[in-house]
Image: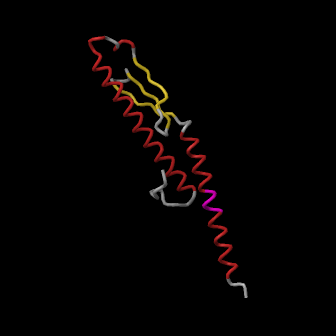
């Protein structure tokens, strides 16, 4: 008599699962802003810190390289450290998303909206 009710229950489960995933993704985005990665160049003479969301949060330069005649070298080291930090941030974001997908029972390589 009420054959359609079973489908409504399935729809409710799907909606709950989608809401749960949305909430977990929002929590992940918050968590990514608290995870810090560090990129280095010049054997650690320049270090750039960034959140796992890619936001640059800090820059440390060893004073020994701050010589006017080495300006271009210092600039290159700064850029290299920042690029490494951003690359590490992206990798960490992907790693954290894969963990979340696996926890939700989904394929780790499932594309997520950005």
The residue drawn where x is 41% and y is 31% is 39
Q: Residue furthest front?
A: 114
Q: Is residue 12 located in the magenta-colored stretch of the structure?
A: no
Residue 61 position (above or below residue 9): above
Residue 31, quarter of the rendered image: top right
Residue 114 position (above or below residue 63): below
Residue 5: give x, y in percent of width and height.
Answer: 70, 79
Residue 85: give x, y in percent of width and height.
Answer: 41, 33
Image quadrant holding the N terminus, namely bottom right
Q: Main secondary structure of the magenta part?
A: helix
The residue drawn where x is 60% and y is 46% is 27
Residue 21: give x, y in percent of width and height.
Answer: 59, 56
Give the number of marks.
Answer: 0
Q: Camera-side residue: 69 or 91?
A: 69
Left or right, 105 with reference to 66: right
Residue 60: give x, y in percent of width and height.
Answer: 43, 21
Q: Residue furthest right?
A: 1
The residue drawn where x is 63% and y is 58% is 19
Q: Camera-side residue: 98 or 33?
A: 33
Left or right, 92 with reference to 46: right
The residue drawn where x is 40% and y is 19% is 61
Stretch of the chain drawn in magenta: 16-20
Residue 71 position (above or below residue 21): above
């Amino acid at each position: 008599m009420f054959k359609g009710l079973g489908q409504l229950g399935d729809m409710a489960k799907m909606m709950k699962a989608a809401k749960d995933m949305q909430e977990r993704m929002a929590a992940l985005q918050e968590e990514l802003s608290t995870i810090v990665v560090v990129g280095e160049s010049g054997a650690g003479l320049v270090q750039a810190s960034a959140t796992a969301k890619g936001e640059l949060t800090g820059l440390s330069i060893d004073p020994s390289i701050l010589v006017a005649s080495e300006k271009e070298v210092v600039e290159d080291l700064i850029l290299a450290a920042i690029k490494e930090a951003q690359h590490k941030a992206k990798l960490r974001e992907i790693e954290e998303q894969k963990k979340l997908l696996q926890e939700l029972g989904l394929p780790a390589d499932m594309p997520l909206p950005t």
